[in-house]
Amino acid sequence: MKHKNIFDPEYQDQSISGKVVIGLERISEVFKTLLWDKAKVLGISPIQIQLLVFIHNHKESLCNVSHLAKEFNITKPTVSDAVRALDKKGYLIKDYSSSDNRSYSIQLSQSGKQLVEEAADFITPLQGQIEYLDKKQLEALFETLSTLIYKLNRSGILQVQRTCYGCKFYQKEKQGHYCNLMEKPLSTSEIRLDCPEFEKP
């Protein structure tokens, strides 16, 4: 029996899941291309852009070398090298005020914040195309993606996620979703992929 090769067009013709995976691969290529294009304009690396954008949008407890390595599924030395380069350019501030003087949290300098304003729009062309979908298509796509992200995390393929489905405050009900922190029902479109209040069960 022929081995299943998801990149084989003949196999894809017989497998809708195979077509979906290839579709996701194409979209990931778009993400990487847009990121690289922006990195070349700004004179920094793609991972440096991702670190700057993440630090700008997340609480301080998540902005340290250990967590950033998990977040982007890269090694601590890789994060440290990127942080060192950004620090040298004046985009970051290392905060050693924690009780453990061997570790530090990372904050953006004023010039780092200004750079993020230029960097964060790299994804706009992709978002612009997605916004052409009608509301029902968008909601169905989002429900599928959020469920897939949760399952990938549960299987150990995706290390970090902060979606409602994996949060201790989330409750699945017959009529839909419920957040025990906000004490309110959630529509599918209100499910978060990156919740600031996320806590593991």
Image: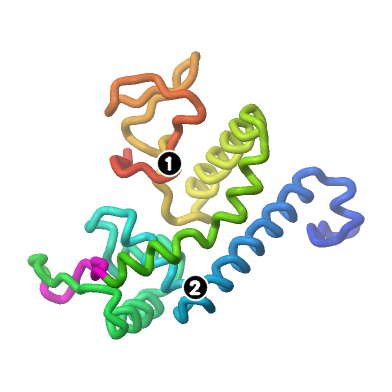
* Marks 1 and 2, how far apart at CA: 24 Å
**SS of the residue at dot 2?**
helix
Q: Quadrant of the C terminus?
A: top left
Q: Name the residue tied to disc 1.
A: 163
Q: Which residue in the protein does label 2 denote?
A: 46
Q: Is residue 168 above or below residue 183?
A: below
Quadrant of residue 163 in the image?
top left
How many residues crowd around disc 2 within 10 Å: few (fewer than 14), some, or many (20 or more)?
A: many
Report the front residue among 58 and 134.
134
Q: Percent from the top left, x then y, of residue 44?
A: 45, 79
What residue range appears in magenta? 101-110
Residue, x 29% and y 72% (percent of image)? 111
Q: Residue at x 23, y 58 (%)?
A: 60
Q: Amino acid at mark 2?
A: Pro
Instruction: Give how far across and how far down residue 109 sits, in percent.
Output: 24, 70
Colour scheme employed for the rendering of this structure: rainbow
Helix, strand or loop at label 1? It is loop
